[in-house]
Amino acid sequence: MSRRTTTRTAVTEGTTMHATTSPTRRRVAAAAAGALATGLLAAGMATPAQAALTTSCFGTAGAGIVDGALVVPAGQSCDATGLVVRGAVTVRQGATLLMDGGSVSGTVTVATDGYLETSGTTLGGEVRLNGAFGASLDGSDVQAVRATGGGFVYSTGSDHRGDLRAADGETVLESSVVTGAVTTTGGTLTDLYDSWVSRGLSVTGPLAGAAVCESEVDGTTTVRGAQGLVSLGDAAVGECGANFLTGDLVLRDNVGGVRVSDTVVRGAVRCTGNEPAPVGTGNRFRGSASGQCAELPEPAAMRLVAVPADRSAAVAAVADRAAERAAAGAAAAAAAGPAAV
């Protein structure tokens, strides 16, 4: 998502400065100490002499270093390019933080209706979404992610070095790696496309179902209690390649239909309580297959499973909400302009 060339404004402990800069989507190289201090002052960020202070950011901010915590005040927007935060970040209620490049060494906490977007950013601490609007993580290095109280986690081309746990929201991984487990409960959907999860996938009760497409999951894959379609490697989600699951596959008590196609499962396959029963074709089950998956009928033989709309529409809706919120945040940051002193 490309965005914005704007006047950048930040406020540090009541002192406001501003400068004009053009954003670029790349990590900012280290600069000499003297030049860096000048850049920090121009961006309105804390200099080393202000290291003990918490920095508030609204408006836009260029490259610089914050030695300490960064806060985006409630209802405000901070649009930062190349900013390095040596501490924790808090995005307060209804606030928006857009980070292009740069890094955060501490945790990132996003409050109710807050929004976080990163592009090519390194996040060294856990991301905590507490009733947030959502988080869009694009091409970023991320630690564990924990989302509660709704909202979405939309990860594209990102490397997660920890578990991803989400409750009552939407979780979409595209071309991402999770060195850990993915666990979701409730919410609308959980979808994986061209992604790898190293320690198992557990999905419970998604209203719109779940999809695993052209992905690898090491460890057990479990989908239970889905109200919508559960699709593993099926054309119902559009273009989709084969899946490779190194552990067991457990499909239990799903009521929106289950399709398993072009999926290799190294472990056991266990299917119980699904209504209608699962269907599928082109699979390779190397372990035992029991229950409803002992002999999977082909989809055409199971008329009770309706042909769904293209799954990509549901994922596109998540991407659209992220783009709209980012655009609104960038516009609000640009409109903040130089603060009156």
Image (cartoon, rainbow, N blue to C red):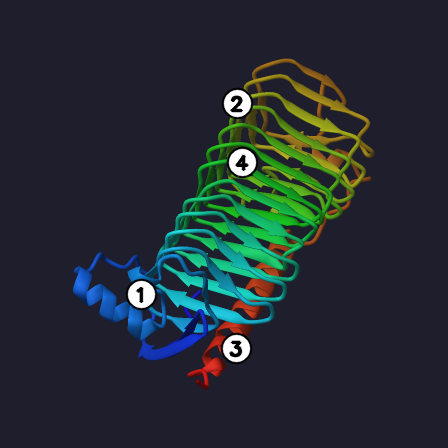
Q: Which residue is mark 4?
A: 163
Indicate the amino acid at tag 2. Thr
Q: Residue placed at 42% from the left, 73% from the top? A: 10
State the CA–CA distance, disc 4 to disc 3. 33 Å
- Rate crowding at label 2 as few (under 14), some (14 to 19) or many (20 or more) other CA atoms within 10 Å: many
State the CA–CA distance, disc 2 to disc 1. 43 Å
Q: Which residue is mark 3?
A: 332
Q: Earlier in the sequence, mark 2 or mark 1?
A: 1
| Image quadrant in which you'd find residue 230 | top right
Q: Is residue 238 visible?
A: no
Indicate the amino acid at tag 1. Ala
Q: Which residue is mark 2?
A: 246
Residue 320 locus on image (x, y percent):
58, 64
Q: Earlier in the sequence, mark 1 or mark 3?
A: 1
Indicate the amino acid at tag 3. Ala
Between marks 2 and 3 in the image, the one whose residue lies nearer the viewer: 3
Q: Which residue is mark 1?
A: 63
